[in-house]
Image (cartoon, grey):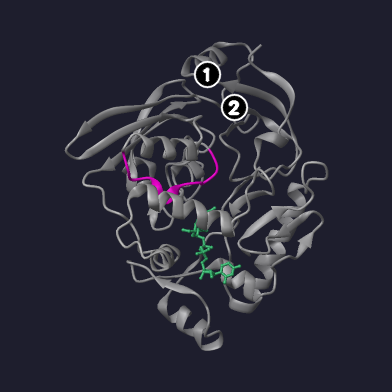
Amino acid sequence: MLVENNVALQALNTFGIAARAQRFARLRSEADLADLMASAEWCVPSPTAPVFVLGGGSNLVITGDIKALVLKVDIPGKRLVEESPKGWLVEAGAGESWHAFVAWTLAQGWPGLENMALIPGSVGASPVQNIGAYGVELQDRFHSLDAIDLQTGKAFTLDAAQCGFGYRDSVFKHTPSDQRSFGLAGRALITRVRFLLPKPWKPVLGYLDLERKMAETGIHAPDAQQIFDWVVAIRRAKLPDPAVIGNAGSFFKNPTVTPDQCADIIAREPKVVHYPMADGSIKLAAGWLIDACGWKGKSVGNAAVYEKQALVLVNRGGPAHPCTGGEVMTLAKAIQTSVYERFGIRLEPEPVVV
Ligand code: EPU
């Protein structure tokens, strides 16, 4: 049977929230999806028969049992498509673990993804929110992806422009009814992703935490493996390991403001952490804003603000007494209200809420 009923999702989301999928199918290949779509168990996705595509579950808050048909994408595979003077074109199945894939590319001698080491989740989910860390975003290394249209069953390929990447954003986070005219949320299932790791390799070292590592170690020309090791160490020091403390990474996006708005905030709060962007806007550190409002360690039920990084909400109850998605969202709303009242800034959540 392709579709299972009443499947527990606690081990399939990194928050460790206990919820169930009324209907659930695990896809190990494109053929599994074709078989499912040809079967009597399939309904073309619609508002009354929605489909929810689940990757690594690392950017997700589940607020109750999921009524949509959950498609868990487990498509494996990693390969070099071609090597050219431009770089290494590498492909991975959507079900591969992102971090294992990054480590594998480095072991093969193909650098380029090292700044994005240790990001939880799957390769297939990586373009959905255009993951990024320590000065590199997925869109900087992305080549193309294969996907299947869940309405027609047809396979298609998208390049970077067609994915509509933005900061923690892509066409896969939007429905056609959103302001953007073209949205693929609930419509496309990503099967394979290709990355172009450019030659010659150039280290990306402009991020403050990496500059600190260079100063501490005296290594000023690190290789890609060294950067990978530093990023792993930095993340382990400030971000909770979801295998130990449930979480979904940064809970809010870093907001951008105009230079005038920023000057206004600096006049009141001189220490606000801010970075000028290439387009003239200014990005503020959401973690600093939340921290300044005194949220570190605060909780609602078993959902809490991580003590070492105020931008991360965690499950304090562990697997036995997990927080609920409702507790997470109540805490998130209280944080949004207090940041808005003090700074006049609306924080936007990063994870998908279902
Ligand atoms: N800060 C505080 N207090 C806090 C948290 C942060 O004062 O509780 C300050 C820090 O001292 C620092 C600044 O805020 O000056 C920014 O913090 P950090 O360097 O840790 O990065 P971030 O902006 O919080 C972003 C990404 C992370 C990514 C890191 C490194 C977003 C929403 N988050 O975090 O991505 O790993 O930079 O590049 O863009 C994720 O998206 O899930 C994620 C973890």
The x and y percentages for residue 13 are 65, 39
Give the residue furthest to the front.
218
Which residue does the image show at 46% across and 74% down from the upper left? 274
Q: Quadrant of residue 342?
A: bottom right
Magenta span: 110-121
Q: Nearer the viewer, residue 221 or 334?
A: 221
Name the N-terminal-most of marks 2 and 1.
1
Q: Is residue 36 left or right of residue 19?
A: left
Determine which residue is flagged by label 1: 33
Is there any visible trace of residue 117 in the rendered image?
Answer: yes
Q: Nearer the viewer, residue 167 or 83?
A: 83
Query: Helix, strand, or loop for circle 1?
Result: helix
Q: Amino acid at mark 2?
A: Leu
Magenta span contains residue 221: no
Determine which residue is flagged by label 2: 71
| Disc 1 Cβ-to-ligand 1 distance below 8 Å | no
In the image, residue 138 sits, relative to residue 310, either above or below, namely: above
In the image, residue 158 sits, relative to residue 119, either above or below, namely: above
Query: Helix, strand, or loop for circle 2?
Result: strand
Q: Quadrant of residue 56?
A: top right
Q: Nearer the viewer, residue 244 or 8?
A: 244
Q: Is residue 27 left or right of residue 134?
A: right
Q: Is residue 286 left or right of residue 127?
A: right
